[in-house]
């Protein structure tokens, strides 16, 4: 009977083995500074990843106030002082995600560790932060491009972790999120129809209150806005000099940078970086062919 049972169990394992994830590399937070939360059929796990690039805080122009506020908040957190969860919202391509990478590159030596979680996995967020409670490091759990649709209930797990559960998040974890939406949830005209005046006071309807209540749980709001032309050209000059040499930024590069932004329909740090890639790449290619 024991031999038969062993044989049947072996057959069962052979059938399900391809569904199982490979054995994960353990995250050594003394050497790894970043990890991704990766889902698999049995739940999820942390996977260590190298830092994507070497972007630093000084590379990000036109957002000095936002940089200072987020760096001060993060440094206070790393020193065990009071700090807020942060919502970084605003125009696309304005440096929100780059600021997160630059923050890690600049403060990893001071003890910052960062974990990125996809918004589709936020239902696992309470489990993740509880696991981190027992780890002797300080973590920013970061969700990029965070937004929810009207039928999406994943935001409830985020609300609970931010300021809803009895225990609250552990003191060694902060939540940072970037989004194009200030309130993270879609807003419609129907939401505003439920608002009404009581005396001289405007009272929002339940739908609006529900949407505002999520973003309100982030204590630090940082708004990012489209660049004006002067700031855009400063960013172009910076990246052209970084990817090439300062001599590559001349009158022809400036004129082409203006044209590039016009064709793209906007000015931002992302557009400046993309222009610099095109300008330096094309210039070096033609020089090699000459």
Image (cartoon, rainbow, N blue to C red):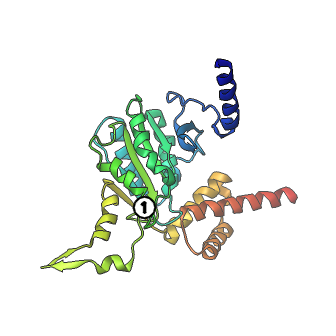
Q: Nearer the viewer, residue 254 or 24?
A: 24
Q: How many marks?
A: 1
Q: Is residue 253 visible?
A: yes
- Characterize the local packing of mark 1: few (<14), some (14-19) or many (20 or more) Cα atoms within 10 angstroms: many
Residue 24 sits above or below residue 3 on the image: below
Q: Is residue 164 above or below residue 45?
A: below
Q: Nearer the viewer, residue 34 or 242?
A: 34
Q: Is residue 224 above or below residue 266?
A: above
Asked if one can make out residue 60 in the rendered structure from this viewpoint, the answer is no
Q: Is residue 37 left or right of residue 19?
A: left
Residue name at image x 64 percent, y 62 percent: 274
Q: Residue at x 28, y 40 (%)?
A: 167
Residue at the extreme left: 199
User: Which image quadrant: the N terminus?
Assistant: top right
| Residue shown at 60% from the left, 72% from the top | 261
Residue drawn at 34 percent across, 40 percent down: 77
* Quadrant (top left/top right/bottom left/bottom right) for the C terminus: bottom right
76 or 33: nearer the viewer: 33
Q: Quadrant of residue 285?
A: bottom right
Rendering coords of residue 166 (x, y %):
26, 43
Residue 125 locus on image (x, y percent): 43, 45
Local SS, label 1? strand
Q: Is residue 79 left or right of residue 200?
A: right
Q: Quadrant of residue 127?
A: top left
Query: Seen in the image, is 162 located left or right of residue 260?
Result: left
Residue 79 drawn at (x, y percent)? 33, 35
Mark 1 — residue? Answer: 89
Which residue appears farthest toward the front when viewing the image?
1
Q: Where does residue 5 sit, x and y in percent of width and height?
A: 64, 24
Farthest top residue?
2
């Amino acid at each position: 009977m024991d031999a038969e049972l062993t044989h049947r169990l072996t057959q069962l394992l052979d059938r399900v083995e391809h569904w199982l994830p490979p054995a994960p590399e353990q995250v050594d937070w003394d050497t790894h500074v970043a990890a991704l939360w990766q889902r698999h059929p049995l739940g999820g796990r942390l996977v260590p990843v190298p830092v994507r690039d070497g972007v630093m805080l000084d590379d990000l122009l036109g957002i000095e106030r936002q940089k200072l506020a987020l760096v001060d908040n993060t440094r206070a957190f790393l020193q065990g002082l009071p700090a807020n969860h942060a919502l970084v919202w605003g125009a696309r391509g304005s440096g929100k995600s780059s600021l997160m990478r630059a923050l890690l590159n600049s403060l990893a030596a001071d003890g910052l560790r960062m974990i990125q979680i996809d918004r589709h996995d936020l239902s696992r967020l309470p489990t993740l932060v509880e696991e981190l409670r027992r780890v002797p490091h300080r973590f920013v759990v970061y969700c990029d491009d965070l937004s929810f649709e009207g039928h999406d209930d994943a935001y409830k797990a985020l609300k609970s972790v931010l300021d809803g559960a009895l225990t609250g998040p552990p003191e060694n974890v902060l939540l940072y999120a970037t989004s194009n939406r200030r309130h993270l949830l879609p807003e419609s005209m129907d939401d505003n129809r439920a608002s009404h005046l009581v005396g001289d006071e405007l009272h929002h309807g339940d739908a609006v209150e529900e949407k505002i209540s999520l973003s309100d749980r982030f204590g630090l709001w940082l708004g990012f806005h489209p660049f004006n032309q002067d700031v855009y050209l400063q960013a172009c000059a910076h990246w052209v000099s970084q990817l090439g040499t300062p001599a590559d930024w001349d009158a022809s590069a400036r004129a082409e940078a203006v044209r590039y932004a016009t064709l793209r329909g906007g000015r931002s740090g992302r557009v400046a970086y993309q222009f610099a890639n095109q300008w330096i790449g094309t210039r070096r290619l033609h020089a090699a062919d000459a």
